[in-house]
Image: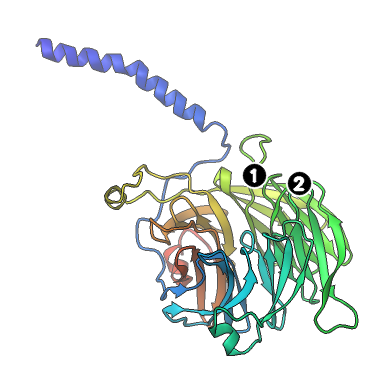
């Protein structure tokens, strides 16, 4: 009887402690004004195709002319440009070309190709310049890792080049700088077949660290990660049109994102999506022409770690609900928005029609040597593919058509 009384007394004594703990947990989450999801996909994700082995660190993936191009660095800090055939890539090493760059491109948008696919423009943040590579060089240049004959030019004296995008007019647009950022317009020098030069500069007011950029016709949309802003810039001539602040749950603290930006067309409307690493959100922004409007913020949840697997490898087995989304991409049909989640190596899925988080699947090995921070999508025939980059190995392609059936009830098409 005395033993039973002691148990009852102990449980009653714990009630205030548990109450304080609950209040503390509620206080920790008070900074988030949106609902925190807790569901994840427990089933296997979309079917994956054979791994594509490319450079050690993948920094950019671009599709052009029936091929995929990957810019990244290898273990000796030499940068390479790899290419692989579409759609059915083979398991093995892709063609590799040495660009002679001490270090690789920055972020997820550090490389782009000309409209005819014959030139690659790669940001070189180590020595502050843009490298120009002849991608039409013969097979010898691609098959020999020491060959550099494809490197045809440089644009020097660019302070920390980050995002690179080539317009339909052939001009190259590069974001540069951090605290004092610029958008540069680079084009061919008159009377020369190969030489390029800076044609125009625009000070990016209100932007700190222009990490990612996407072009939409005659406009550029730029994601500024430290200042939590997205800018809309006209390209001809360069001019600032509009800006908007992305989701910021910390009421003004800089650095909540965005780390990447993607674009989706829905009828006569244009939507932008930014992956906000530090706030675990995706901002949904509508381009209204002369203004940008933040219309939603979607919270991303990570996938719980496999307790048995991580314990066997000495990894923290705590359930992960702070995935840190770095990259964002839109499915070719515009139905889904994907995020690459660094902490748990998962890919998150958002329904674009209703801005609802649907879940996530483990897209990379738990013990990947480098976090997932590059996503790319493409439609080939009737197949929609999502490429997830893993630094230590290469690209994991996923056939994402199956998501249309998996989420038929939760996510309307169109």
Residue 207 x %, y %: 76, 48
Colour mapping: rainbow
Q: Which mark is residue 247?
A: 1
- Toward the left, the furthest residue is 1
Question: How much space separates mark 2 and mark 1, taking CA atoms?
Answer: 21 Å
Q: Nearer the viewer, mark 2 or mark 1?
A: 2
Q: Residue at x 9, y 11 (%)?
A: 1
Residue 350 x %, y %: 53, 57
In the image, 242: left or right of 299?
A: right
Q: Earlier in the sequence, mark 2 or mark 1?
A: 2
- Asked whether residue 401 appears in the rendered view, the answer is yes
Q: Which residue is mark 2?
A: 179
Residue 14 x %, y %: 30, 18
In the image, 39: left or right of 381?
A: left
For mark 2, does the 10 Å Cα neighbourhood hold few (<14), some (14 to 19), or many (20 or more) residues?
some
- Helix, strand or loop at disc 2? loop
């Amino acid at each position: 009887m005395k033993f039973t009384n002691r148990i009852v007394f102990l449980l009653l004594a714990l009630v205030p402690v548990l109450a304080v703990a609950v209040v503390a947990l509620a206080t920790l989450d008070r900074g988030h004004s949106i609902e925190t999801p807790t569901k994840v996909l427990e089933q296997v994700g979309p079917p994956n195709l054979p791994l594509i082995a490319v450079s050690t660190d993948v920094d950019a993936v671009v599709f052009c002319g029936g091929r995929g191009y990957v810019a990244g660095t290898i273990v000796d800090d030499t940068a390479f440009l790899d290419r692989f055939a579409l759609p059915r890539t083979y398991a093995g090493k892709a063609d590799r070309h040495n660009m002679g760059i001490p270090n690789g491109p920055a972020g997820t948008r550090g490389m782009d190709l000309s409209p005819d696919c014959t030139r690659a423009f790669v940001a070189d943040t180590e020595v502050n310049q843009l490298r120009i590579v002849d991608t039409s060089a013969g097979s010898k240049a691609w098959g020999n890792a020491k060959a550099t004959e494809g490197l045809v030019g440089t644009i020097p004296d660019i302070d920390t080049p980050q995002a690179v995008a080539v317009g339909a007019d052939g001009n190259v647009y590069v974001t540069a700088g951090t605290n004092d950022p610029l958008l540069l317009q680079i084009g061919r020098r008159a009377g020369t077949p190969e030489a390029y030069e800076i044609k125009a500069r625009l000070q990016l007011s209100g932007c700190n660290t222009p990490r990612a950029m996407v072009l939409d016709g005659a406009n550029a949309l730029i994601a500024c990660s430290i200042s939590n802003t997205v800018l809309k810039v006209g390209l001809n001539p360069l001019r600032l049109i509009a800006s908007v602040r992305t989701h910021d749950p910390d009421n003004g603290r800089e650095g909540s994102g965005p780390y990447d930006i993607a674009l989706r067309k829905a009828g006569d409307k244009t939507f932008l999506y930014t992956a906000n690493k530090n706030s675990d959100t995706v901002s949904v922004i509508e381009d209204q022409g002369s203004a940008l409007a933040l219309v939603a913020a979607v919270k991303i949840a990570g996938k719980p770690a496999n307790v048995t697997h991580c314990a066997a490898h000495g990894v923290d087995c705590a359930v992960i609900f702070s995935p840190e989304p770095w990259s964002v991409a839109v499915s070719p049909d515009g139905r889904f928005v994907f995020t690459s989640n660094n902490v748990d190596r998962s890919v998150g899925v958002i329904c674009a029609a209703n801005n609802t988080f649907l879940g996530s699947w483990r897209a990379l090995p738990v013990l990947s040597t480098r976090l997932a921070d590059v996503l790319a999508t493409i439609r080939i025939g009737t197949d929609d593919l999502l490429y997830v980059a893993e630094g230590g190995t290469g690209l994991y392609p996923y056939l994402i058509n199956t998501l249309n059936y998996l989420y038929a009830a939760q996510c309307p098409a169109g």
